[in-house]
């Protein structure tokens, strides 16, 4: 590889970002990784070629960020549902005429379980009496969407699995989830633990995201079929790739 022209900005937030950054830093390619939590920072190796920055980035200020950090190219390894940062990075890279690459997590093949595994295009298809009323529902969507379920707390028994962070816990409590209906775990979740949690809470519906195998989607699909529990999978957003 030739002389590096600027720092490579890696948008983190996934296990794949850790693997990519580790491999690139081992080749002495200067990388700047951005993540949103200290826990995510600790996943990266210590290397003189690798700088990890913790904190949220404002999409409107990405051009200034890229210029200030001496970024020469962008490698987007963010979560498939981290739409805002991806759109902002694409726009900034195009405006500054620097390369933008995205690592796209492989999607899973559709399950041959009609009536049990449901792919849905948006929350509107889930926030209905047909899906929620009278059910014991486990949400593994992340904390940002829990508030959308607050009006349904009186019509369903809602449970949520969230990341072990103060921000996630605060959002869940504000959305009406009581402590006995929350569990804070960082993926990956073993198949045994996943199944035990569904059984412990006597879950009758599970709502998750199409996050691929690294996000445990394959495990949830398998357990849903084993236990005969309907699984609703929110499709990945589209229309923001370069």
Image (cartoon, rainbow, N blue to C red):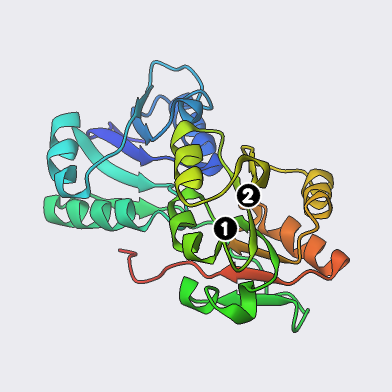
Quarter where residue 171 is shown: top left
Q: Which mark is residue 165?
A: none
Q: Are marks 1 and 2 in contact (CB under 8 Å)?
A: yes
User: Picture coordinates of residue 76 (x, y %)?
Assistant: 38, 48
User: Picture coordinates of residue 35 (x, y %)?
Assistant: 39, 35
Residue at 35 percent of width and 30 percent of height: 31
Task: Classify mark 1: helix, strand or loop.
Answer: loop
The residue carrying pointer 1 sits among few (fewer than 14), some (14 to 19) or many (20 or more) residues within 10 Å by Cα, namely many
The residue carrying pointer 2 sits among few (fewer than 14), some (14 to 19) or many (20 or more) residues within 10 Å by Cα, namely some
Residue at 35 percent of width and 28 percent of height: 54
Q: Quadrant of the C terminus?
A: bottom left
Left or right? Give the position of 180 relative to 1.
right
Q: Residue furthest right?
A: 226
Residue at 75 percent of width and 84 percent of height: 114
Alpha carbon of mark 1 to alpha carbon of mark 2: how far?
A: 7 Å
Judge whether 202 appears above or below 191 on screen.
Answer: below
Q: Which mark is residue 211?
A: 1
User: Picture coordinates of residue 9 (x, y %)?
Assistant: 31, 38
Task: Classify mark 2: helix, strand or loop.
Answer: helix
Judge whether 40 appears above or below 121 on screen.
Answer: above
Residue situated in front as seen by the camera: 227 or 70: 227
Judge whether 50 appears above or below 99 on screen.
Answer: above
Q: Label 2 belongs to which residue?
A: 214
Quarter where residue 199 is shown: bottom right
Residue at 56 percent of width and 61 percent of height: 153
Quarter where residue 73 is shown: top left
User: Picture coordinates of residue 34 (x, y %)?
Assistant: 35, 34
Residue situated in front as seen by the camera: 176 or 212: 176
Q: Quadrant of the N terminus?
A: top left
Residue situated in front as seen by the camera: 15 or 224: 224
């Amino acid at each position: 590889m030739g002389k590096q022209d600027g720092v490579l900005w890696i948008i983190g937030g996934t296990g794949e970002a850790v693997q990519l950054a580790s491999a690139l830093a081992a080749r002495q390619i200067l990388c700047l990784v951005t993540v949103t939590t200290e826990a995510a920072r600790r996943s990266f190796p210590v290397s003189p070629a690798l700088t990890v920055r913790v904190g949220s980035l404002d999409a409107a200020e990405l051009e200034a960020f890229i210029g200030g950090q001496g970024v020469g190219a962008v490698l987007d390894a963010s979560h498939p549902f981290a739409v805002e940062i991806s759109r902002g990075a694409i726009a900034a890279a195009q405006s500054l005429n620097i390369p933008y690459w995205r690592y796209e997590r492989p999607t899973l093949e559709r399950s041959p379980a009609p009536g049990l595994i449901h792919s849905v295009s948006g929350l509107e298809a889930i926030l209905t009496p047909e899906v929620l009323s009278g059910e014991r529902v486990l949400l593994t969507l992340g904390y940002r969407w829990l508030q959308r379920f607050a009006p349904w707390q009186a019509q369903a028994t809602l449970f949520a699995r969230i990341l072990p962070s103060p921000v996630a816990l605060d959002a869940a409590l504000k959305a009406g989830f009581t402590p006995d209906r929350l569990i804070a775990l960082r993926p990956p979740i073993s198949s045994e633990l996943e199944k035990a949690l569904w059984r412990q809470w006597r879950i009758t519906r599970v709502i998750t995201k199409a996050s691929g195998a690294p996000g445990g989607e394959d495990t949830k699909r398998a357990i849903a079929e084993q236990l005969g529990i309907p699984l609703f999978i929110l499709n990945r957003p589209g229309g923001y790739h370069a």
